[in-house]
Image (spheres, rainbow, N blue to C red):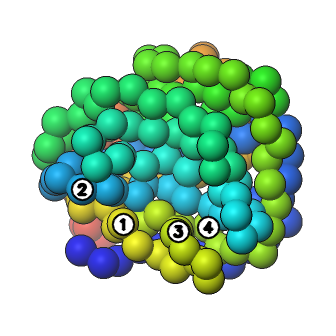
Amino acid sequence: SSQSLSLADHADFGATDSLTMAVWINTDALASLNGVFSKWGSSANRVAEIYFDSAGTLVGRTNSTVSVSAASLIAIGKWYYLVFTIDGTTQKLWTNGELIVEGANTTTLQNGGEPLHIGARMTGDPHVAESFFDGKIGGASWSATAMTEREIKAEYQRGLRRINSTIDTNDTI
């Protein structure tokens, strides 16, 4: 599909040494680039993003050159909790509360006036949303601090309880 959520730039999305991007996904396909969460800084640099590349590899990236990636363990039609953290010196990519890859963060996070996108990647100059995510997205969050392992595992468990709940949230009281 070609739908995404775009949030105007805000001071909360500004330059910082640390951040966390977290999101629940349920994909329908991983056949091409799938943008999950994307924030650009200047014309040449991303602040940070989570996406699947054309080979289906899960990527967490800051700026344009610094990234961590891992072969995707994502199955179509199943919910997963993805988290990308940067603590100033280290980037970490998590799936379902488990650390899957980490690497050095050798860059300063950028700042800029570009919107934050959920469900797409921003590319080109001027930046436009494209490489849309094919599936469902829920519970997206952005924080100017890096979540700890304990916090990530706790949020994953809370999310599982919501997903597996038998309460019909469409019912009225």
Q: Secondary structure at mark 4?
A: strand
Residue in the picture at 24% in, 34% down: 74
Label 3 sits on residue: 122
Q: Which label number is shown at residue 116?
A: 4
Label 2 sits on residue: 32
Label 1 sits on residue: 131
In which quadrant of the rendered view does residue 12 lie? bottom right
Q: What kind of residue is marked 2? A: Ser
Q: Nearer the viewer, residue 19 or 69?
A: 69
x and y, in percent, of residue 49 in the image: 56, 50
Marks 1 and 2 in Cβ contact (< 8 Å): yes
Marked residue nearer the N-terminal end (3 or 1): 3
For the residues labelled 1 and 2, the Cα–Cα distance comes to: 8 Å
Q: Secondary structure at mark 2?
A: loop
Q: What kind of residue is marked 4? A: Leu
For the residues labelled 3 and 1, the Cα–Cα distance comes to: 8 Å
